[in-house]
Image: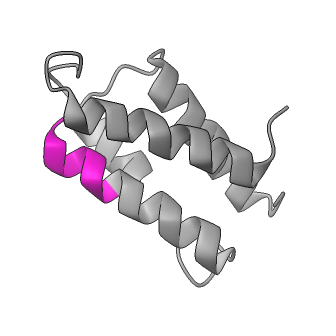
Amino acid sequence: MAGFDELIEETKSEIRVLLRNPDVRPAYMTYDQLRDVQSEICRMARIRDPEKFFPYYPKGMADACWLPDHPLVIKLNKILDLYINREF
């Protein structure tokens, strides 16, 4: 199992690829959504306290109908689980 910081770095890298290459980005993921998610996971890595900062991206992914089986969504959900359970 990847550690919290390692998973954050992998996910940021995947987001950068999607931001730079719109032709490989799923249509349901917008540039702005991905930038917001990237910003939020950086804040999570820095703050490390779900009582001080809780990300919006889980609701945003649901509202925008991101596919739950997409590899990026799976990683984002894993990051959230680790964050909520304080497994840094």
The number of callouts visible is 0
Q: Nearer the viewer, residue 16 or 81?
A: 16
Tell me if residue 17 is in the magenta stretch: no
In the image, taking residue 2 as reference, residue 31 lies left or right, namely left
Q: Main secondary structure of the magenta part?
A: helix
Q: Is residue 28 above or below residue 77?
A: above
Name the residue rendered at 80%, 37% in the picture. Answer: 2
Tell me if residue 32 is in the magenta stretch: yes
Q: Position of residue 9 (x, y in %)?
A: 59, 47
Residue 34 visible in image: yes
Q: Quadrant of residue 85?
A: bottom right
In the image, taking residue 75 as reference, residue 49 lies left or right, namely right
In the image, taking residue 2 as reference, residue 35 lies left or right, namely left
Name the residue rendered at 44%, 17% in the picture. Answer: 70
Q: Nearer the viewer, residue 81 or 8?
A: 8
Q: Position of residue 12 (x, y in %)?
A: 47, 46
Q: Is residue 78 above or below residue 65?
A: below
Name the residue rendered at 48%, 15% in the picture. Answer: 69
Q: Quadrant of the C terminus?
A: bottom right
Q: Which residues are magenta?
A: 30-36
